[in-house]
Amino acid sequence: MQPDDHVCLCFRVSLRKLQNHLERERPTVASQLSECLGAGTGCGWCVPFLRRLHAQHVAGTLPALDESPEDYAARRTQYRAGRRHGTYDRPSSDPMASDPDRSPAPSVRVPLTQLRRGQRAIVDCSNLADLPEGERCLLHAMGMHDDCQLRVCSPGAPCIVQIDDTRLGISAEVARRIMVTPIEDGDRRAP
């Protein structure tokens, strides 16, 4: 992985940013890496890698990852798909990978309209196939696509959600069709 490749794909935090944060802030525990642009607080895929980078820094070596960006992204896609279906494929460096008692509970999909203010979720747009193409394209252009993460700013009609830096107002009719997997506090753990 090169310095400008993203380690945290949810929040687009590069290896270089994490290396600089480690050098500048000298975090005493790996979970403090979440202070670097929210790394590790999205889907959780990068948490074991953040732990590895922290351990390398503590050992006095330059934090680095041997993963190719393509393999890393492909494995994360598999991990997120497994989360939706209740199976998990964590990196082998994650202690939770070998401890079934510590594995998160299977995820449940619910309509977007069932989320509370401030709640986060991962989007599944498969139920939008019956929307007019123009509406589907507009939602996608504004950042709503499968596996994106959103936060509910205001439930109701319209349902206002935030995706990255964009806020969208979604009609109740469309919001009922958007299925999401809520991210519980345990799923949002930092590294």
Image: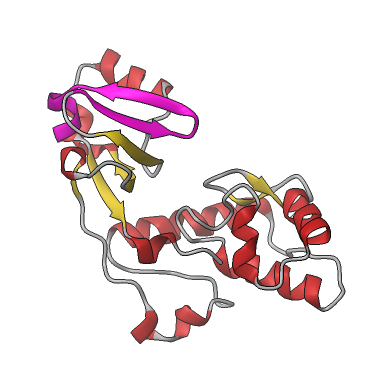
Horizontally, residue 77 falls left or right of residue 101, namely right
Specify the segment rendered in magenta. Answer: 158-176
Q: Position of residue 74 (x, y in %)?
A: 53, 54
Residue 64 in magenta stretch: no
Evaluate whether residue 173 shows in this view. yes
**Quadrant location of the N terminus in the rendered image:** bottom right
**Quadrant location of the C terminus in the rendered image:** bottom right
Query: What residue do we see at 74% from left, 65% from top?
Result: 66
**Residue 87 vs residue 17, the one in the foreground:** 17
**Residue 167 vs residue 139, the one in the foreground:** 167
Evaluate whether residue 49 shows in this view. no
Image height check: is 166 above or below 94? above
The color scheme shown is: secondary structure
Image height check: is 113 above or below 15? above
Horizontally, residue 86 falls left or right of residue 149, namely left
Q: Position of residue 73 (x, y in %)?
A: 56, 52
Image height check: is 56 above or below 19? below
Query: What residue do we see at 52% from left, 82% from top?
Result: 95
Q: Position of residue 146 (x, y in %)?
A: 36, 40
Q: How many marks?
A: 0
Extreme residue in the top direction: 134
Q: Quadrant of residue 124?
A: top left
Q: Quadrant of residue 133?
A: top left
Horizontally, residue 44 falls left or right of residue 111, namely right
Q: Quadrant of residue 22?
A: bottom right
Q: Position of residue 3 (x, y in %)?
A: 79, 50
Query: What residue do we see at 46% from left, 85% from top?
Result: 98
